[in-house]
Amino acid sequence: MKKYILSALVVSTATVFTACNDMLDTDPRVTDLTAATFPGKPGDVEALNAATYSIMNTLGGGDQSGILNNPFYWWSLMSDDCYGSGGLQDNVAKSLHHFTTASSNQYEQDFILLYGGISRANNQIETIDNVVWTDAQKAQRNQLLGEGYFMRGLYYMWLSQMYGDVPLITSTVITDEMQQQVSAEDAIYPQIISDFVSAKNLMKPERANGSGHADKFAAEAFIARAYMFWAGFYKGVKDLSTGSGPAITLVEQEGCSGGSLSQADVVAGLKDIVSTGGYELLPDFRSLWQYSNSLLWDEAHDNADGTGNAEGTHAYAFIADMDRANCFDQPGMGNGNKEEIFQIQFMNASKWAIGGTYNNPRMYSNYLSCFWGLRNGATNDNGRRDKTYPFNQGWGQGTPSCNLWDDWTDAERKGEYTDIRKLGTMIDLENELEAYTYEKDDNEESGYGVKKYADVNLDACAADNDSWWSKCEGYSSSSLDNKQQGDHFEDYYLMRYADVLLMLSELTGDVSYMNQVQARAKVPLTTSYSLEALQNERRWEFAFEGLRFNDMRRWSGINSGESSYAAKALEAQKGKMIVCYGQKGAKIPMAHMTCSWAKRYADTNGFLPKPQAQITLMNGKMQQNPGWDENASAAEYTYKVLY
């Protein structure tokens, strides 16, 4: 078996020197190092680089105030593909789904973490030439500088998509001007895309090969993602297939000569990935996800041929028809595969304590697997294999919506096909897990679970709550002493090659790129491009990967009101029949807790509230977002117990 339990660069830590400033609670300060002495050698810059990346792990694995910090998880909850769900006490998840807040600083953690990442990237960029680089080390220097620019652009893109107009800080010495809130449309996005352009031009023209580092091709892909959001959301170009996207003005800095970037430039970058990147779609969609691991496949086949396996009698039929060579843990599949362009990696080092902002010991585990895990059964039934095999227990927050299942099923029915991605993405609890029961305080349950990123158990595991990772080569018992909560090491995909292909179809109207994704799923090929076909294809391919919400926003445009694509899609949740208080036989219609999804989306444009503590700290230099401010109805944005 391929070794998967490893120490990844992106979860390394390093001590970072930053300039002292009262503005924004972002990053711990130290006094034993100065900018004059650190970094002093290439290895020091490597350490700074690792620290810059490590913010992604705190986002992807951190758990603060009862909610996972992963922005893509938040965006999944805010989309029409998920409900808030969970138990009665899980008000943060339900707040996100209903565009409400239970406290003024409820969404502060990501604000702080993202500015912390920006601070680290700024330091990396500014101090890189403290090192005396030889001619032979110039490529290493440029690669590290490019990665610093890439990560700053990435963190600013996430920050601005979550919180809108914010201060643009591009130096460790924070001037009064930098402390002022600026326009995301006019100032922040030009900087984001310029950072990605610098990264593209500075980094080596070769693949990172699943190392956890960004590479030139990741930069080209994220240029496209950032540009498409800016052109759609801010500039109102909802259909880019006509080539009508405007040019964006760039910032002059190392690696970026200024000027502007056009839609044609974006397309050229994506085509470069296709022609020279060496990426490819995996042959089977299921190979991307840990439920297709070979150990589970072996159990299915031991049972299917009547021989039984050593310790159990289960069989997971959904993967029985796979080629074993395509299983998640086989060479070229799963973590580090040729489809993933950029990702968050994890390692076998989690601890139970929640810890501080930057050193959360859960950061080494992909905690998404725990949050999306099944919240099964009556008291003490959680995680029992006779009820949930092959899936493990978890918090059950952010369960799939009825809308996603129903819309997908309607598309299958109209096209007279079966899309393997539907059951490759969602657990049909009633038909796949017949013994599954709800907890007595479950709310907003749809009858479905998330299969992507779902933790998997085996009959071969020692206990009900064990994870299949405990049987992998290189595994050692986690210091968390709770495998169900700590043993989650599946990469979190931030960019897949499938996205490059679908972005190319959307930007050019050329269906041949989309057809490659459809052919992998064995669904009918689109013969004539339409935005609707592209929208559906993105929804099916990337469900629960956190892309849907910002896709909806860019297909709507800012200030588009209650009749926009996003508002109407969100409002379509109303009236869907859901399970509350675990009463499967007494479903109730889904309702918004204060007013309507359409109104809350229209009022907020999909932005979260800026943390009040940070607004206060800024002393009038940063303002609250519309829909959450004094001009909005507090009754409509304040969390209310609905069930």
Image (cartoon, rainbow, N blue to C red):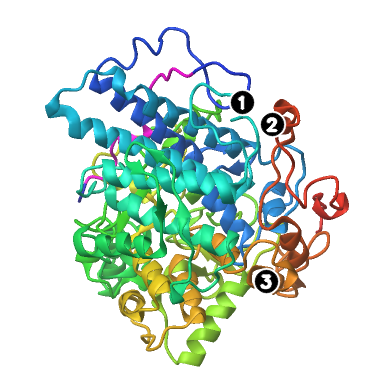
Amino acid type of the residue tagged 2 in the rendering = Gln
Give the residue type at disc 3. Answer: Ser
Structural distance between the alpha carbons of marks 3 and 2: 31 Å
Relative to 474, say whether 538 is above or below: below
Q: Does the rendering let one see residue 535?
A: yes
Q: Secondary structure at mark 1?
A: loop
Crowd around label 3: few <14 · some 14–19 · many ≥20 (10 Å): many
Tag 1–tag 2 contact (CB < 8 Å):
yes
Is any part of residue 441 visible from this angle? no
Marks 3/1 in contact by CB < 8 Å: the verdict is no
- Disc nearest the viewer among 3 and 1: 3
Give the residue pinned by disc 1.
25
Mark 3 residue element: loop
Highlighted range, magenta:
3-18
- Front in this rendered view, residue 385 or 159: 159
Residue at figure coordinates x 22%, y 45% from the top left: 3
Which residue is at the far left? 136
- Residue type at tag 1: Asp
Q: Earlier in the sequence, mark 1 or mark 2?
A: 1
Q: Nearer the viewer, residue 22 or 251?
A: 251
Q: Is residue 5 magenta?
A: yes
Out of 482 and 574, give the one closest to the viewer: 574
Quadrant housing the C terminus: bottom right
Q: Secondary structure at mark 2?
A: helix
Q: Earlier in the sequence, mark 3 or mark 1?
A: 1
* Residue 564 - label: 3
Label 2 belongs to which residue?
614
Q: Magenta: predominant secondary structure element?
A: loop
494 up-or-down from 169: above or below:
below
